[in-house]
Image (cartoon, grey):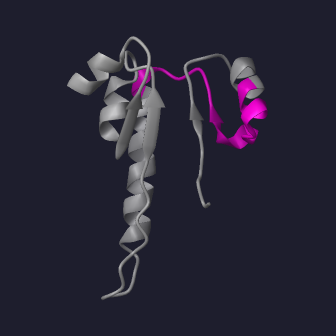
């Protein structure tokens, strides 16, 4: 499907490795022990990479459109959820994320 999945979590490294293994993520796609501002920075970098790749096309050719989707609990993740192309908030913090 061409989907590139990365885990951004504030959880410890061992917990991230365990969950990552269960869902089939390689360790190089795991980012653990992150503060909310670090998640925001990584989302920003992903968006910049997609923007740079999309602008390298030929004139008259429609570039392939890719999106960055951020899924989080909504409380600490609200800034990153708002920055991503698509933000999916779940849990008790969903209402806060929708207000951001």
Establish if 32 lies above or below 61. Answer: above
Say which quadrant the N terminus sits in.
bottom right
Q: Where 52 falls versus 23 (above or below)?
A: below
Query: Relative to residue 39, is residue 97 drawn left or right?
Result: left
Q: Quadrant of residue 96?
A: top left
Q: Is residue 45 visible?
A: yes
| Residue 70 screen position, x and y as percent | 44, 37
Where in the figure is residue 55, as x and y percent of width and height? 35, 72
Q: Is residue 65 magenta?
A: no
Q: Residue 46's spot in the image, x, y percent?
A: 45, 49
Q: Residue at x 39, y 51 (%)?
A: 47
Question: At 40% across and 76% down in the image, what residue appears?
Answer: 56
Q: Position of residue 15 (x, y in %)?
A: 71, 18
Which image quarter is the C terminus in? top left
Asked whether residue 100 is in view, the answer is no
Comparing 13 with 71, the one in front is 71
Residue depicted at x 44% and y 60%: 66
| Numbered disc total | 0
Residue in front for this viewpoint, 72 or 53: 72
- Magenta part of the chain: 19-37
Is-magenta flag for residue 22? yes
Farthest-out residue, left? 99
Task: Choose top left, top right, bottom left or bottom right for residue 23.
Answer: top right
């Amino acid at each position: 499907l061409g989907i590139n999945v990365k885990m951004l979590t504030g959880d410890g490294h061992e917990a991230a490795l365990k969950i990552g293994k269960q869902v089939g993520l390689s360790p190089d796609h795991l980012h653990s022990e992150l503060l909310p501002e670090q998640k925001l920075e990584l989302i920003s970098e992903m968006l910049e990479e997609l923007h740079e790749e999309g602008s390298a096309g030929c004139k008259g050719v429609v570039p392939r459109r890719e999106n960055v989707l951020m899924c989080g609990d909504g409380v600490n993740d609200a800034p990153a959820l708002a920055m991503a192309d698509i933000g999916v908030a779940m849990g008790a913090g969903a209402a806060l994320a929708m207000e951001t």
